[in-house]
Image (cartoon, grey):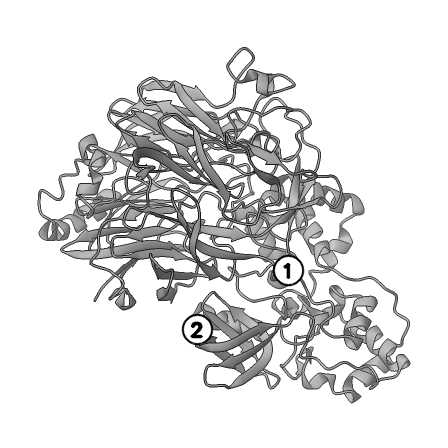
Amino acid sequence: MRATGRIRVAALLMALGAAAGSSRLALSSPRQDTMAVQLSPDDLQRGKQTFESTCSTCHGLDGGGAMGPNIQGIPFRLGVDAVTNVIKNGMAGGMPAFGSQLDAQQIRQVVGYLLTLSRKDEGKVTGDAASGKQVYASAGCASCHIISGEGGNIGPELTTVGQLRGPTYLRNTLLFPGTDLPQTRSFLESGGMLEFLFVHIVTKEGRAFEGTRVAEDSFHIVLEDAKGKFHSFRKDQLREYKKEPGKSMMPSVKGKLSDTQVNDLVAYLAGLKGAQ
Amino acid sequence: MRITKRALLLPALLASISPVAFAQNVPYERILHSQSEPQSWLTYSGSYFSQQYSSLKQVNRANVSNLKVAWMYQPSRPVANLESSPIVADGVMFITEPPSTVTALDVRSGLKIWSYTPNLPEHVVSIGLYATSRGVAILDDMVYIGTADAHLIALDAKTGAARWNVHVADNVMGYAMTGPPLALKDKIVVGIGGSEAAVRGFIDAYDAKTGKRLWRFWTTPRPGDPGAETWGNGAAQSAGATTWNNGSYDPDLNLIYWGTGNPAPDFNDDDRPGDNLYTCSLLAIDADTGTLKWHFQFSPHEDHDWDSDEPAVLFNTTIDGKPRKLVGFANRNGFYYVLDRVTGRFITGVPFVRQTWASGLDANGRPIKAPNQEPTLGAGTLVYPSITGGVDWTSPSYSPQTGLFYVSAHETGAYFIKGTGKIEPGPPKGIVGGGGIRALVGEQSYGAIRALDATTGKRKWEFRLLSPAWVPVLSTAGGLVFSGTDEGNFFALDAETGKLLWDIQMGHSARSNPISYEVDGKQYIFVTAGNTYIAFTLP
């Protein structure tokens, strides 16, 4: 059951490394990103201090994991309300309840700080978003990605990609997919592999498969191929299993789109922040 | 509610369990000779020697692939990870449910017989730890639990009624109990947690019948005490060396072996120059008097949070034709140690995972520290192993059948970062860590079950795991090693070769000691998966 759930979630996560993490924004309230905006720099600084004194032993100073799991970007994946609830009441898996130790404002500050941990929002928009929307349609991006309920489901959803990813990251990934994939520790216990790792597999019978890893344990590997089909293997039935960091299922737009088109497309994607 | 439920269940249970089996009397002599009743599991790690070994062999290399789920039990409300190692005696299993509930189950069916939940305060302080419980101890007709608010409670084994309840330490100051008590002779020995709240560790012994405290051994000194000179700025504020896991016991030597945790603050050592005794050490303590017989400090002046709280594995062997009484210890600092448990003398020590902080150990086992491996300001220092160590608290296993020591090893490093951290008087406001870590990313970490020659530490085989696992190990006379992965797998390996013989995806990782017991002529393998207890047996 759980594996199925994991695969379903992972199905949202495919191919476009640029949108790493953002794919799960569909699972959360589109208004949640406004929270960080409402918090002052002082609030975020206090959230950082509380995080470091209370949370970092288990989750690392950067939220990347230590004794406990990596939680970078978790408010985007689970939603601000859910994360607030977990901090307050704890959860199965070893997360203690902090409701009696931290007040509501402190928890808000911590969640606000968490929202900042997985962002790569550098860069300035130089293109035209309206033109970029045309580029998105004409270049066939929608055949793999969903925006506001429309599009194909091979790659991750982009409805709110602009919350986490800024122009510099988006441009780089459109031109060189796979070069800046998330390098998180696997978020195994809560399901889903977040690294968009490209894998190459050959079975003992000689059948070859390539795709993005969507689930793995010590004995099994599940990948999604270019057609969006899942393939599941026992590792002891494989002749070859190669991990290829840096590769991506997404084709580069280099040489296919002009600089202007790329800038416009970046402007369009950077502006996708969900319902306002 | 509890009584009604029990009343409903009792007739059915009595029909299937013999009156003798339901007597619930486990005197010291039974625990002492636990090897003569492998159908039971009478201590945290199966015996006073903490070997995590079962001499049952109905489940063996030839048939382990047929293991099937016999029953499951889930706590009635969601809890943190189950880390409780069950006690099994006379047809009844005693488990704990976080934070501090004790539950008795019928070992045949998994049905609940009774459950006891202490009245915890509304606000339980848990700093640097989570309020779990790693199990109970049993002695005579009582079971004993250390609670999240640092009480030791004795319960009637047959009914779950409280017999006595003593206040061990002040939870408001950060003291908490997660480890199982150790029952021996007429006393109950307990450790304490709370290093990250900068408490001062100790080991206590209580009269098993009355709860009266018999002795306390403080694990850090105060000015004038032995070891005070190892706290360079004075021992007035010495803190840490908590004792949050279980100890081992040699009845012939009458010595308790108990590991201690890190000094406080963890990563900022500015205020504690010196070796900081007795942090990150193994202590040998006289069971009757609570006096220290010897100590061995694995990591003098430790600043990476590498506790030494894993249960010490006692074993007897022959070296150069002479019978020897030894301790095997796979330390969080990445070295596997063999000590003489009579004298505490160092025999050998070798890395069992990649480590970068020491260029080796000297003739006395003291580490020769490598340069530039301390936590630093800013981006920090990359050090192997990580904060989770070569292995943390999860028990290793020793098989007298193979002479091998099995450990679930972590191959990973981390950037250790120094921050500010001062010990302030009064109740702690948060973790007194003085820094922290950033984990390595991507595919750079993995785990492995490693089989070491227990006497030399030389690796005989390994079985690779996708990620470092927090799962204890069990070995059996069936030639098997059981353990799990952090991805939710539970598996059996050939104890001689490490070959995979069976595995199952359980949906969540195991965190408790896998154990084995026998009832009605059937051997069971028992482990937790996330929020569930699972008993496996052959069809």
List x then y, in percent, for residue B140. 20, 32
Disc 2 marks a residue whose amino acid type is: Asp
Q: Chain of mark 1?
A: A
Query: Is residue A18 shown to the viewer in this render?
Result: yes
Q: Position of residue B102 (x, y in %)?
A: 32, 41
- Which residue position holds label 2? A236
Spot the residue most to the top: B224
> Can you tell which quarter of the image residue B264 is in?
top right
Number of the front mark, 2 or 1: 2
Q: Residue at coordinates 22% horizontally, 52% vertically from top-left? A: B56
Counting residues from the start of the chain, the first of labels 2 and 1 encountered is: 1
Is residue B155 found left or right of B508 in the rendered image? Answer: left
Structural crowding at the residue carrying mark 2, measured as other residues with C-alpha within 10 Å and reported as few (<14), some (14–19) or many (≥20): few
Whether A54 is drawn above or below A274: the answer is above
Quadrant (top left/top right/bottom left/bottom right) for the C terminus of chain A: bottom right
Alpha carbon distance from label 2 to label 1: 26 Å
Mark 1 crowd level (few <14, some 14–19, many ≥20, 10 Å Cα): many
Q: Which mark, residue A276?
A: none
Please say if the residues under marks 2 and 1 sit with CB atoms less than 8 Å apart.
no
Question: Which residue shows up at 68% across the image and 68% down it?
Answer: A20
Q: In the visual, does B320 lie left or right of B355?
A: left
Q: Quadrant of residue B104?
A: top left
Q: Please check whether the numbered discs 2 and 1 fall on a single chain.
A: yes
Quarter occupied by residue B498:
bottom left
Residue receiving disc 1 = A184
Q: Decide: is B243 above or below B390.
A: above
Q: Position of residue B126 (x, y in %)?
A: 51, 37
Please give the chain letter of the residue carrying mark 2: A
Describe the element under mark 2 as helix, strand or loop: helix
Taking B411 as reference, is A97 above or below it? above
Q: Is residue B168 visible?
A: no
